[in-house]
Amino acid sequence: MLFAGSDRDGVADGKITVAYRRWAEPRVVEGRIYRTNAGRIQIDSIRTVNPELIADTDAEVALADRRNAKDVRRRLRGEESMPTFLIRFHLVEGPDPREELAAQTSLSPEELADLRARLAQFDELSHHGAWTTETLRLIQSRPATRAADLAASVGRETAPFKLDVRKLKNLGLTRSLEVGYELSPRGAAYLDATSV
């Protein structure tokens, strides 16, 4: 989930704990933690609502930092035929475990073996062949390059390429930049260890 303008600050401050979204289908799952541009949030609940039945007095209107029900409806994006979701969430305090993982500058033999096994599994389950080491080396050699350009350079479609990079990021091997990606210290340590 992304938050625009003052909403981003409100979520980051813990003031906004509700969002209304118009989506074809739910994009978040109750109980899960998501990284957003306002910090990490955990989804407390998600349910569909009829936007025409939202009332000015609904507590959720204030928790979403909206002036009234009309303001809620005015800010909804997407086709009106799509369902509207009311999402309750809270800010998750503390450091992001993925960032802490990515900051590792060395790997123990056990960590290296675990990473090798996980990446080998990704390669094995892939429909387009082994990709993990190639992708890490590509990001290392071309940091801050658009995902579409990186994907094209290895003959891949952008969307599945980005999903694969997200798998690497979840293991703390890459970081997302404003444009493109970079290898994390952990990713660099992994490549150093595997090239020996």
Image (cartoon, helix red, strand yellow):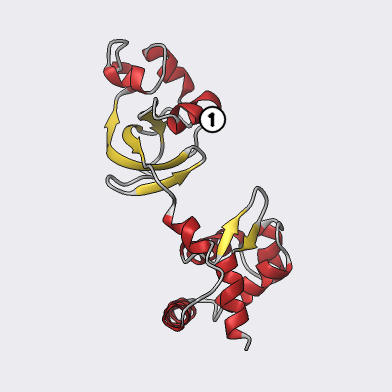
Q: Residue at x 49, y 79 (%)?
A: 123
**Rendered view: 5 above or below 124:** above
Q: Residue at x 31, y 47 (%)?
A: 29
Quarter in which the C terminus is drawn? bottom right
Q: Is residue 25 visible?
A: no
**Rendered view: 159 above or below 78:** below
Q: Give the x, y percent position of residue 161.
A: 57, 64
In the rendered structure, which amino acid carries the disc numbered 1? Answer: Ala
Q: Residue at x 38, y 28 (%)?
A: 20
Specify few, some or many for label 1: CA neighbours under 10 Å numbering under 14, 14-19, or 20 or more.
Answer: few
**Rendered view: 11 above or below 187:** above
Under circle 1, the secondary element is loop
Front residue of 21 and 121: 121
Which of the 4 image quadrants contains residue 91? top left
Q: Identify residue for label 1.
A: 4
Q: Residue furthest bottom?
A: 196
Which of the 4 image quadrants contains residue 53? top left
Q: Give the x, y percent position of residue 127.
A: 49, 76
Q: Residue at x 46, y 83 (%)?
A: 109
Front residue of 193 and 116: 193
Determine whether, in the image, residue 24 is placed left or right of residue 189: left
Q: Is residue 93 visible?
A: yes
Q: Give the x, y percent position of residue 147.
A: 65, 58
Quarter in which the N terminus is drawn? top left
Number of numbered markers: 1
**Rendered view: 32 above or below 154:** above
Front residue of 189 and 48: 189
Q: Give the x, y percent position of residue 6.
A: 52, 24
Determine whether, in the image, residue 122 is placed left or right of residue 157: left
Front residue of 31 and 104: 104
